[in-house]
């Protein structure tokens, strides 16, 4: 029956696709962040902007996985892994292209990033340097790990609410269907009329009789 499907397999497939889309969007945001106003980038040392990106990634992953009406609890930690992995992958991809374009372009001719910077050569050249932040001590890399943790935690909470809501709704539907199926039909004899005949009033000794029948 369709209402008993856990949504595990569709949730896994949709989660992978949404994580890839989130990583691509985040990588583009990291690459083109230099086009934003300097005040926006420098506000709060860039932490509010990065935290907002983490929430966007979590929202994309959780909404996509929640669209298949999942009821499997196993998808909840998977959503956290997908969101955290998408956050890390997006940061690495965007940083790799940015570093590679910097290495291939002289400082005098360097300008804001554009679509021409998205090449395999730039990605390959910057890839060895991009993950270095995650390998640094926690006192240096705490911000990058914080963004990943926020994305994972937000996706976990959002999908938990969705799964609980779906399970609650399906449980209520199952209880209602069971109550309807267990209700006993009204018994009627084979030749019993649908409507009982109207009972005639009883007579007593003081009731006058019909003179025509006397």
Image (tube, grey):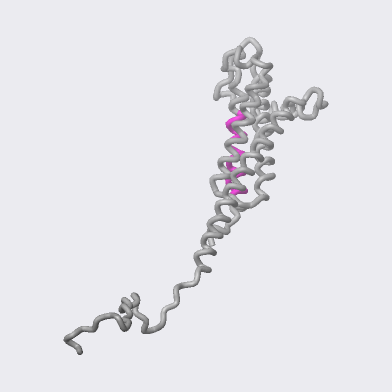
Query: Vertically, is 72 above or below 82?
Result: below
**Which is more toward the observer, 41 or 165?**
165
**In the displayed structure, does residue 178 sit left or right of residue 155?**
left
The x, y position of residue 112, in whole percent, is 58, 16
Quadrant of the rendering where the C terminus is positioned: bottom left
Q: How many marks?
A: 0
Main secondary structure found in the magenta portion: helix
**Which is more toward the observer, 27 or 168?**
168
For the point 81% across and 27% down, the residue is: 138
Is residue 141 visible in the rendered image? The answer is yes
The x, y position of residue 174, in whole percent, is 55, 59
Residue 98 lies in quadrant: top right
Extreme residue in the bottom direction: 214
Q: Which residues are magenta?
A: 11-27
Residue 79 lies in quadrant: top right
Query: Vertically, is 128 above or below 180?
Result: above
The x, y position of residue 38, in whole percent, is 60, 12
**Which is more toward the observer, 56 or 99?**
56
Query: Vertically, is 176 above or below 118?
Result: below
**In the displayed structure, does residue 184 sit left or right of residue 124?**
left
For the point 68% across and 16% down, the residue is: 45
Residue 90 lies in quadrant: top right
The x, y position of residue 72, in whole percent, is 64, 52
Is residue 122 visible in the rendered image? The answer is no
Extreme residue in the left direction: 212
Extreme residue in the front direction: 206
Quadrant of the rendering where the N terminus is positioned: bottom right
**Which is more toward the observer, 149 or 199?**
199
**Can residue 15 be found in the magenta stretch?**
yes
């Amino acid at each position: 029956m369709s209402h008993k499907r856990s949504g595990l397999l569709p949730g896994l497939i949709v989660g992978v696709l949404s994580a890839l889309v989130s990583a691509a969007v985040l990588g583009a945001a990291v690459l083109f962040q230099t086009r934003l106003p300097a005040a926006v980038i420098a506000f709060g040392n860039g932490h509010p902007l990065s935290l907002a990106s983490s929430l966007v990634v979590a929202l994309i992953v959780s909404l996509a996985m929640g669209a298949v009406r999942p009821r499997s609890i196993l998808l909840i930690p998977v959503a956290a892994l997908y969101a955290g992995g998408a956050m890390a992958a997006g940061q690495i991809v965007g940083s790799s292209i940015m570093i590679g374009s910097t290495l291939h372009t002289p400082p005098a001719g360097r300008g804001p990033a554009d679509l021409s910077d998205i090449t395999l050569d730039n990605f390959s050249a910057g890839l060895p340097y991009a993950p270095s932040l995650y390998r640094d001590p926690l006192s240096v890399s705490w911000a990058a790990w914080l963004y990943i943790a926020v994305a994972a935690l937000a996706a976990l909470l959002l999908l938990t609410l969705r799964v609980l809501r779906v399970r609650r709704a399906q449980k209520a539907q199952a209880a209602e269907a069971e109550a309807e199926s267990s209700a006993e039909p009204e018994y009627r004899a084979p030749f019993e009329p649908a409507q009982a005949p109207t009972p005639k009033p009883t007579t007593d000794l003081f009731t006058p009789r019909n003179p025509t029948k006397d």
